[in-house]
Image (spheres, grey):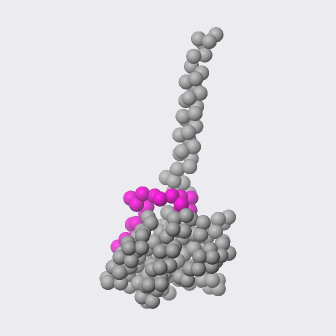
Amino acid sequence: MKRDRWWLPFLAVGVIVVSGIGLLYYNSPVRNKSSGPLDSATTTASSRENTALELVGQQLPEFKMTDQKDQELKSSNQYEKPMLVVEWASWCPHCQQQLPIVQQMYEKYGKKINFVMLNMMEKGKETKESADQYIKDKGFTFPYYYDRDQSAADALQVQTIPSIYFVDKDQEVTRVAVDHLDQEEFEEALETLLNN
């Protein structure tokens, strides 16, 4: 009887391995990428896989956003100066690390560069109230707007947040950052933007 069931331990191990692989696939950012920009928002995708990088050297796509008074604006309203465009959300840990550096850059460069901070809204995750409360709690003073229907994220090909776009005075995207920038890298990118 025992000899007839020698294969049972191997079957148990096989079931566990197949289940583990299935779970990894089900939760992988590559699989989720096709579902929309937010599904993999908190992952750090490889730069080679991120289509937002394809915008470098291109004209900034026009997008719409909403201000705190619920007025709809277009990105073209910001064209009189170079722009820094950042898509972010208050719940995103990478954004929480990056936004204090953005604030420092705003304090230094806010008169020379238009800062367009786009809060990515998502049902059940980010609301106007949660974004406003986060900004207030952190004491941030940079201007921010709401990407209510994620149409700006779609136009900017956002796959991960924060996604950071450096745009010169001719509306050309000169650099896209999808990984964390420290203060020195950020300042260097803004100086390059101003000197173009």
Q: Residue furthest left?
A: 196
Q: Which residues are magenta?
A: 36-57
The quarter holding residue 165 reads: bottom left
Residue 120 on image: x %, y %: 58, 70
Q: Is residue 9 visible?
A: yes
Answer with left or right where residue 131 lies relative to residue 105.
right
Residue 178 on image: x %, y %: 44, 65
Residue 160 on image: x %, y %: 50, 63
Residue appearing at x 53%, y 60% in the figure: 42
- Screen quadrant of the N terminus: top right
Q: Relative to 181, does residue 82 appear above or below in the rendering?
A: below
Of the pair 191 and 120, the residue shown nearer to us: 191
The quarter holding residue 170 reads: bottom left
Tell me, yes or no, whether the highlighted magenta stretch contains residue 46. Answer: yes
Q: Relative to 31, does residue 93 appear above or below in the rendering?
A: below
Answer with left or right where residue 187 lies relative to residue 88.
left
- Screen quadrant of the C terminus: bottom left
Residue 173 on image: x %, y %: 39, 75
Of the pair 153 and 127, the residue shown nearer to us: 127
Of the pair 65 and 110, the residue shown nearer to us: 110
Total marks in image: 0
Tell me, yes or no, whether the highlighted magenta stretch contains residue 100. Answer: no
Q: Is residue 114 visible?
A: no
Residue appearing at x 68%, y 75% in the figure: 129
Residue appearing at x 49%, y 52% in the figure: 30
Residue appearing at x 56%, y 29% in the figure: 13
Q: Provide the major secondary structure of the magenta segment.
A: loop
